[in-house]
Amino acid sequence: MMLRVEKIAKSFRGLQAVAQASFEVGSGSIVALIGPNGAGKTTCFNMIAGVFPPDSGNIVFDGKKLNGFRPDQVCAAGIGRTFQIVKPFAGLSVLDNVMVGAFLKEKTAFGARKLAREILCKLNLDAKADLLASSLTLPDRKRLEVARALATRPRLLLLDEVMAGLRPTECDEMVAVFRELNRADGLTILLIEHVMRAVMALAQKIVVLHHGEVIARGTPAEMVRDRAVLECYLGEDVEV
Amino acid sequence: MNRRAFVLLGLLGIALLILPAVANAYVLSVATLILFFAYAGQAWNVMMGFCGQLSLGHSLYVGVGGYAAAALFVHYGIGPWAGVWLAIALCVALGALIGLLAFRFGVSGVYFALLTIAFAEFTRIGFDHIQWLGASGGFFLKVAQREQMDLANFRGPPAMYYYAILALCVLAFISSSLLLKSKAGYYWQAIRENEEAAQALGINTFRWKMLAVVISAAMTAVAGVFYAFYYNNLFPEQIFHISRSIEIILGPIIGGIGTLFGPILGAAVLTLLADGITEALAALGWEIPGVKQVFYGLVLLAVVMFLPNGIWPALARRFGLGK
């Protein structure tokens, strides 16, 4: 297992956001974390990414405990992340944004620029490399968010609702990009997603959170038939 | 930077090099002052313009740097070439202390700026009471024999000081542009733009912010040494005063925060205009105290209203000079 999340819990001033949640992400797999709003998905992400430590439980990445790591240490360990609310470096160009990420593994500006350009090509942002990040549209900002995280050359990529706000065609493009990264580069992906179209197309395994607890896990086909999942999240007549 | 900018820079360089041969003493003193503020502004810009950490207490480093080198010179006869290292070491230590307090305990934004003011202020009050350094009465270096050049002790004619500060400006400009294009520059700008996102990309924000503060402090310390040996007198009330910090940061703000030419252009515009208006008013017979400050205020107001990114970015766009 690449990532093992063992009974992690987190409360905010008495509100139990995540309670004893456990799940695993196998090397080379794509796992989706789904659930209704407030289920604790982003809190789980933030604990994995080192934004705050879990109150209890363990996060183990490649056999190494990540508890108490800062976000930069988590990233250096090989986990890249995107933010649900995009955080571009607005005053820098698209290329410079990605170069910042690339410097984690590249020592020189030359090497970082080269890597950044390769990644921009993968995400179809190469034509916009010299634009200011602040001038991008939302779909492009989401792509930039992914490009920047990829530039750190992660082995596990955490995607927090990167499909939200995208049109169906844009969503399909993104799905294709992630499939290619997973297939060609062996990138492992853990994604939080509400867009079921993307979840069904991407995920090999789904973990369903509700009130901070894992209520179901399995393949996408199993999940859309699961009673508990239908009741709390997907609704009775889900179309996928 | 494109070819047109290079040609202009070359012409400016030649003009600056031959200036002492053609200018009178007054013009040379104004030019020296401009270069002093351009250099100090460049140093401040590393911290605020590149890394987004607002210091309103850079007079601290000018003062400590100046006093350190002056004390070695006056009390022990050790020249500034050695003294500058003590100045740098002390300012680096102070900068590191401020950074440690602020960045370890999450003091940021306005509160960080207040911390920098606090350090400058209590240092000013402390120096008011150090008899060994003249206390509030001032600390004086023996005024230089203006005709004789004594490079070892950095005493000589005004042109020597002019060339020294010009060299410092060139060095600061080159090192700033190299830093900006390096990993450090990218990391600093990322921290400036969004610290949370920067950290998520593997940047140890504490370490890189400390580096910016320390480099900025070290550069400003050298400005302090220059100040001490050029003016030959140091008063805590002047050198540590917050108005000195403001004077330092106005250049980059007017010229363009975070740009390489902004601090130079801003220092030139402010010094020339302030001096020009003082002269003009004197010629008219209106000797009004504080008119320089009013003028600073007006220019700042105009720039903030019409050129919020500073003069340089607008100028560069207008004349196609690149960044």
Image: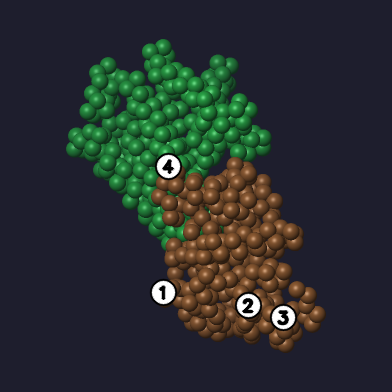
Chain colours: A brown, B green
Q: Residue at x 45, y 52 (%)?
A: A103
Which one is nearer the viewer's eye here, A208 or B227? A208
Name the residue that disc number 1 marks.
A64
> Of tags 2 and 1, which is closer to the observer?
2
Which mark is on residue A224?
3
Which mark is on residue B310?
none
Q: Is residue A167 left or right of residue A208?
A: right
Instruction: Assess disc 1: are there few (<14), some (14-19) or many (≥20) residues with their C-alpha within 10 Å of its C-alpha.
Output: few
Identify residue type, mark 1.
Answer: Lys
Identify residue type, mark 4.
Answer: Leu
Local SS, label 3 = loop
Q: Residue at x 58, y 30 (%)?
A: B316
Q: Residue at x 23, y 33 (%)?
A: B79
Seen as rendered, the residue at the extreme right is A237
Q: Are marks 2 and 4 in contact (CB under 8 Å)?
A: no
Q: What is the distance, in whole Å, between disc 3 and disc 2 at their CAs? A: 10 Å
Name the residue that disc number 4 marks.
B179
Residue B192 place in picture, x, y as percent: 53, 50
Q: Residue at x 53, y 28 (%)?
A: B2
> Of tags 4 and 3, which is closer to the observer?
3
Local SS, label 1 = strand
Query: In the image, is residue A118 above or below residue A156?
Result: above
Image quadrant where residue B227 sits: top left
Is residue B95 in sight in this rendering? yes
Query: In the image, is residue A148 above or below residue B222?
Result: below
Identify residue type, mark 2.
Answer: Ile
Q: Are marks 3 and 2 in contact (CB under 8 Å)?
A: no
Same subunit: marks 2 and 4: no
Lower position in the chain sequence, tag 2 or tag 1 = 1
Q: Is residue B139 left or right of residue B103?
A: left
